Image (cartoon, helix red, strand yellow):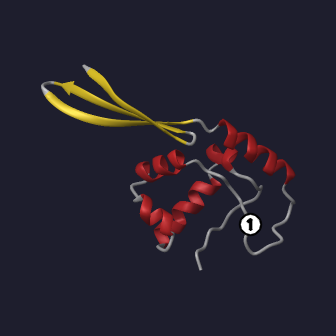
Amino acid sequence: MKQLLDVERIGNRTHYWWKHWDDGEKKITLQTYEDVQSTLDANKRAYNDAPKRFENPVNKIASIPFNVVEHFCKINKISFSEMQEAKSDRAQKMWNRLLNDPDLRNFRTRPGYVDFKQG
């Protein structure tokens, strides 16, 4: 049995707080939903309008929703904070993997291969 305790909306994200009773054990879980359609639409426009070459030392290459990065970290067993700091070789490899993943290409705002290096 489960009971909805609270709903919290922050920007495009909605958090659902649930109380569960499973096998006599009480649990509280957080379910997060994020509407990413506006991000996908903006990314598609930016991708189509992007110049073919990188002309600046710093270029926006993607807009990735928090939930996607959070899920990526979970399945790749890397902490979100390590990923966010991007100082370790492992984190930089994970960013390269994330940014060049063909399944996540709709979050890219520029074409091309990304070689992420934090200097």
The percent position of residue 23, horizontal first and vertical second, equals: 15, 24
Where on the picture, by quarter, is residue 8? top left
The percent position of residue 94, horizontal first and vertical second, equals: 52, 61
- Vertical comparison of 115 with 5: above or below: below
Task: Name the one closer to the observer, 98 or 47.
Answer: 47
Judging by the rendered image, the residue that carries numbered circle 1 is: 59
- Side of 99 where 83 appears, left or right: left
Judged from this view, the residue extending furthest toward the bottom is: 119
Task: Name the one closer to the observer, 6 or 60.
Answer: 6
- Vertical comparison of 43 with 118: above or below: above
How would you rate the neighbour count of disc 1 (Cα within 10 Å): few for under 14, some for 14-19, many for 20 or more? few
- Amino acid type at circle 1 is Asn
Q: Look at 84% across and 48% down and name the residue there.
A: 48
Q: Look at 58% across and 75% down and name the residue there.
A: 118
Give the number of callouts: 1
- Side of 109 where 75 appears, left or right: left
The percent position of residue 98, horizontal first and vertical second, equals: 57, 55
Q: Look at 81% across and 67% down and name the residue there.
A: 54
- Side of 83 where 96 appears, left or right: right
Give the position of the N terminus as an image quadrant: top left
- Vertical comparison of 40 with 74: above or below: above
Q: Which element carries disc 1, helix, strand or loop?
A: loop
The percent position of residue 77, horizontal first and vertical second, equals: 39, 55
Where on the picture, by quarter, is residue 96? bottom right
Judged from this view, the residue extending furthest toward the top is: 1
Q: Look at 49% across and 74% down and name the residue there.
A: 87
Give the position of the C terminus as an image quadrant: bottom right
Task: Name the one closer to the observer, 108 or 90.
Answer: 108
